[in-house]
Amino acid sequence: MDGTGTLMTPDASDTNKETIAALIGRLDDPAIDNRHNAVLALAGIGPDAVQPLIRSLAEATEDERRWYRSVALAKVGTPIISPLIAAMKENPDREFRRYSAAALGELGEAAVEPLIDAMACDDRELRGYLSKALCRIGKPAVAPLTRHLSDADEILRSCATLTLWQMGETGLAPMLEKIHDAKKA
């Protein structure tokens, strides 16, 4: 109660923050079922869990901890795309970027264009992680990447070529076809 006799209740956003923090803490629980349940609960919370999960991933120092945070991010879905790419631009830590790319790679087609757009940067290492996310997405990324093979932006053109190359058979055939068609014209 406050000084007027009114019962004070916690702000809903404070309660949600506490719940999210508790669930993130459960991602480190020794019991695997508790970790899995925390992942599902965080996914159910949705966009409100994104920034706390990104911060927690950035602070994680062990692979298993990073893994569960990246899985939870991926389970949240498309609301992670922009904030996670932005965080990857700000945070040069290789492990953070690797696990972030893994989470983005699980989102499929929805993440393709934002990942390609983010490659238009000067950070060569970041472009490599974005490429890995696109490779993980696979086939849904091929047509958009192929369209960038003749991009005016040299960096995007190079990134598209290298990413298609890294995809192996999935990316090579469309890339070679595009090159063959260009030589015919």
Image (tube, rainbow, N blue to C red):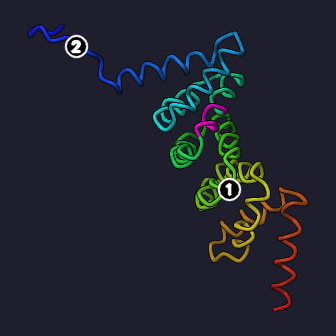
User: Residue 146, how many percent across, how many down?
Assistant: 75, 70
Gap between marks 2 and 1, in whole Å? 46 Å
Q: Which type of secondary structure does the marked residue at label 2 adopt? A: loop
Residue at the image position 62 percent from the left and 28 percent from the top: 69
The count of marks equals 2
Label 2 or label 1, whichever comes before in sequence order: 2
Q: Residues within 10 Å of mark 2 (few under 14, many from 20)?
A: few
Q: Quadrant of residue 100?
A: top right
Residue at the image position 52 percent from the left and 49 percent from the top: 82
For disc 2, the marked residue is 8
The residue most toward the left is 4
For disc 1, the marked residue is 109
Q: Is residue 85 left or right of residue 99?
A: left
User: Residue 142, how many percent across, how many down?
Assistant: 77, 63
Q: Is residue 96 above or below residue 59?
A: below
User: Residue 21, how many percent across, how many down?
Assistant: 48, 20
Magenta extent: 71-76
Is residue 154 magenta-colored? no
The quarter of the image holding the N terminus is top left
Residue at the image position 63 percent from the left and 58 percent from the top: 119
Q: Is residue 68 left or right of residue 80?
A: right
The quarter of the image holding the C terminus is bottom right
